[in-house]
Amino acid sequence: MEPSFGPGGDIWFMNVKELNSSENIVVEDCSAGGGRCARGDGLRWEFSEATVANDLKADRLDWTEPETFRQAELVKENALRRVWRVQVGGKEYYAKYYYRNGRRWKVKRFLRGPECIKEWRVARYAFEHGVDCVRPVSYAVARGGTGRLDCLLITESIRKAIPLNDYWESLRGFGVSEYQNRISELEDSLAELLAKAHQSGISHSDLHPGNLLVEVLESCRPRVCLVDLQSVRIGKDVSDREAIYNLAQLNQWFRLNATLTQRMRLLKRYMEYRCAMAGDEGSRWGQGTFKHWAKMMEDAAYQHAAKLMASRDRRTMRRTKYFEFLRLGHHWQGHFFLKTKHPLEYSPASGMEFRAKDWRKAFKDPQAVMERFAGESLPLKKSSGTLICRGMLTLGDKSVSVVIKRQVNKSFLGMIRNCFRKSRAIRAWKAGYAMIHRGMAVAKPLAVLERRIGPVVFETMLVTEEVKPSTNLRAFMMNTLGEIPVEKRGEFKSVITEQLATLMRKMDFNGFTHRDMKGVNILLQNMTFEYKGQPAKDIRVIVIDLDALKIDGRKTERDQLRAIVRLSYCVDYSEYVTRTDRARFLKAYLTQFGSGRPDWKKLWRKIAVERNQGK
């Protein structure tokens, strides 16, 4: 295999014969420029080429502490790994550090050895089979059994390469024709890479756009490379089931950012490449089997999404870098939001990073917080067992406008029930994040607290971000809609109808029920009580009152019907909502891919019957 050259003659991919021969070079120290060496910092190095040791300055720099380098940037971090971008000798490298952590790591380390060596071997295998991936130039293993660092891997940075998701977003600024051409080229490169990898026995178990780099080339289509090679399995034939599951993993991101036509075209091109590479077995990937593979990928995508969402749901109740569990004074305890990997467009707080100590300071006395909020503004709701207030919460150097709902459990039977189930606030916390994880907009939960003594819960607090600026759907339909000029009124109704229908359709599909689906619990963000010329395209429909959310996979048709009936009451007294608007909502609610022509008249009659029975 010949090395591949880029602009200026830089070697991207190493000649495999050279790699194999360099591993046999053993020298006494790094300064000699050999293949292996041991340093006084406790690392044993391996280099791909004899000159790499000098390029990395392994004899002069302390690679165990990359933060001390002049040009070093932390790119990614978790409990087990850190990735740094560093510049040494005029070249840019990525250094991935693997750390010792827990008993599980010890077992994996004993059975598999250092993880950096696995990536090293996977890269060699990929180069040998012509599959594009990042080029590792060196690795080092800690010789001692103490210390946190276990090993590290250094790879060359690919010039003009960015993650696939960032590249995809960058194409939106082009014109329609140029955008379609670039998307087509990207799909072709991606399909060829995946087909070649699967045909060569390479299966990536964590295939998402962040682990695919796109290198922009001037004279030809972009090149796509595999990254994060520790999640790659090699040496065995990739079964049809594994191949489809790999595509389903990638589809998890593409279904939110690409059209159905683009996703189907990518699958078709993948099958064409597999057919050309498979030879005698190419008939399995022929055009006649496209519908079969499309159906398999749809089923696999659904299973993968369910598994991924369940994992994210469980994370909200654990101590991670995204959430924290704290025990406070006066028998209070709770879960708190720290940060998120993917900020929400409609939630400013989701783009902030909070600290556990700031939460602890802010809620040192939760009762005092509620008294302060109730004194500063008129409570949104006040009853014998419930108090809802809004206010500005200060967390360190950040301030967030929040709504706090406090519930006191005065019923003895309710206390007994909560001993055997999660409290209402905890259920609302979990249901809110479950909806967010599945792409539905709700007021973001920031904290949930319980005053608990043993198994008995006496009172709870749920802290959610306040949606600003906004007005509820009922007020908009009855008042604001009449202030909008007649020529623009139809556009506003169309945008709200489509978003609301999509929201309720997703809730039905994922098994969510809102037991109080009325107009005041639906907020229209970026719209105020008075119309001030806001464009209709900026409106976003957001659900509040998370206490009324219920997750039940066995959702019945009657549950769906009740939610629509409750929602229909909010427009009864609006003279600006016609029967035609109601029919359009039902059509939008019933229409989805593969549903055919919606039978909205049948649903109309069912709603009428349900409303008459409720009177």
Image (cartoon, grey):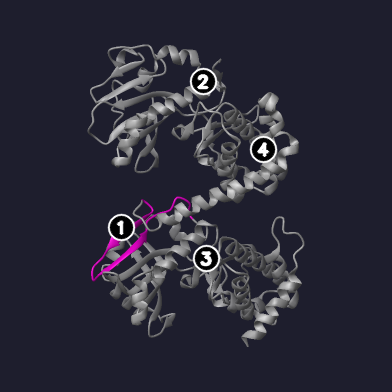
Kindly identify the amino acid type of the residue bearing the numbered disc 1: Ala
Magenta highlight on residue 355: no
Query: How far from the left and from the top, in percent, is residue 474?
Result: 59, 78
Task: Report the residue marked by disc 1.
Answer: 356
Label 1 to label 2, Cα distance in Å? Answer: 47 Å
Q: Quadrant of residue 47?
A: top left
Mark 1–mark 3 distance (CA, rounded to whole Å):
32 Å
Residue found 68% across the figure and 77% down from its top? 607
Q: Position of residue 49 (x, y in %)?
A: 41, 16
Quote the CA–CA distance across marks 1 and 4: 45 Å
> Which part of the image, by quadrant, shows the N terminus?
top right
The answer to whether residue 400 is visible is yes
Give whichever of discs 1 and 2 has the lower sequence position.
Answer: 2
> Which range of residues does the magenta coloring cover?
321-343
Circle nearer the viewer, 1 or 3? 3
Amino acid at pointer 2: Asp
Q: Earlier in the sequence, mark 1 or mark 3?
A: 1
Q: For the C terminus, which image quadrant?
A: bottom right
Sequence-wise first label, 4 or 2: 2
Q: Which mark is residue 317?
A: none
Q: Position of residue 556 (x, y in %)?
A: 60, 69
Instruction: For mark 1, give the secondary structure.
Output: helix
How dense is the environment of label 4, judged by Cα within 10 Å: few (below 14), some, or many (20 and up)?
some
Residue under circle 4? 182
Amino acid type, callout 3: Asp
Question: Which image quadrant for residue 116?
Answer: top left
Nearer the viewer's eye, disc 3 or disc 4? 3
Report whether residue 572 is seen.
no
Q: Residue furthest bottom?
A: 615
Numbered circle sitting on residue 10: 2
Q: Which mark is residue 552?
A: 3
